[in-house]
């Protein structure tokens, strides 16, 4: 199995506002780094080669990022040991502080490209039930077998 991830963020201003320009100007560069990273499999993108223009939520200020990786280690390495960390450190410049969980990981069958609806479901589940093999964060020590055996609560 592979590992899917979603993270959402609420922008401080519209995407074309000068406040967001450094974030937007770094998107292609960071996405290229992700795609070249060992263990990268897939990422959600629209016509502009990113997911910014995709409207997944009723709130136009909420944006989504989704990707699939061979393992949690490969995703962790990209997130915290590549140039991505430089952008991550600046998130307060562009995004509001989220009170709910805004990042979730879960296992998917190899070859499966998760949908934004799946991602929304995993985030909702994580917020309602905490970390489980169905949806978890980087600290979750779950393996694919745990996810296969887990029966989500209703």
Image (cartoon, rainbow, N blue to C red):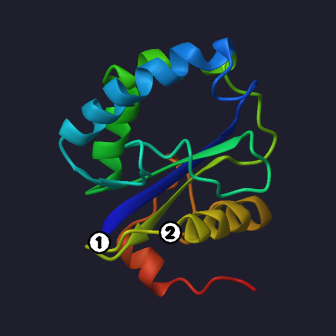
Mark yes or no: residue 72 visible. Answer: yes
The image position of residue 75, as x and y in percent, is 35, 44
Q: Return the x and y of residue 86 as percentages of the image width and height.
A: 44, 15
From what the image shows, is residue 135 above or below residue 16? below
| Residue 89, visible in the rendered structure | no
Give the residue displayed 46% in from the left and 76% down from the top: 147
Would you name the residue on which mark 1 appears? 1
Q: Which image quarter: residue 76? A: top left
Residue plotted at (61% across, 21% down): 91
Q: Callout 1 environment at 10 Å: few (<14), some (14 to 19), or many (20+)?
A: some
Q: Residue beneath label 2, please?
A: 115
The residue at 75%/45% (across/down) is 60
Instruction: Judge left or right: residue 121 versus residue 149.
Output: right
Which of 118 and 80 lies nearest the eye of the viewer? 118
Q: Which residue is drawn at 56% across and 64% down?
A: 116
Judge left or right: residue 1 versus residue 143. left
Instruction: Say which of marks 2 and 1 sits in front.
Output: 2
Separation of marks 2 and 1 at Cα, in angstroms: 17 Å
- Helix, strand or loop status at disc 1: loop
Q: Where is residue 78 in the image (x, y as percent from the top left)?
A: 32, 34
């Amino acid at each position: 199995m592979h590992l899917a991830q979603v993270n959402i963020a609420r922008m401080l201003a519209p995407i074309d506002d000068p406040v967001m320009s450094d974030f937007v100007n770094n998107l292609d560069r960071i996405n290229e780094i992700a795609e070249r990273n060992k263990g990268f499999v897939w990422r959600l993108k629209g016509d502009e080669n990113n997911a910014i223009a995709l409207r997944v939520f009723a709130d136009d200020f909420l944006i989504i990022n989704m990707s699939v990786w061979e393992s949690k280690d490969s995703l962790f390495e990209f997130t915290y040991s590549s140039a991505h960390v430089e952008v991550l450190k600046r998130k307060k410049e562009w995004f509001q502080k989220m009170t709910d969980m805004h990042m979730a990981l879960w296992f998917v069958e190899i070859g499966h490209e998760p949908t934004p609806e799946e991602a929304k479901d995993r985030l909702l589940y994580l917020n309602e039930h905490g970390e489980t093999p169905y949806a978890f964060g980087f600290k979750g020590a779950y393996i694919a077998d745990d996810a296969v055996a887990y029966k989500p609560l209703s």
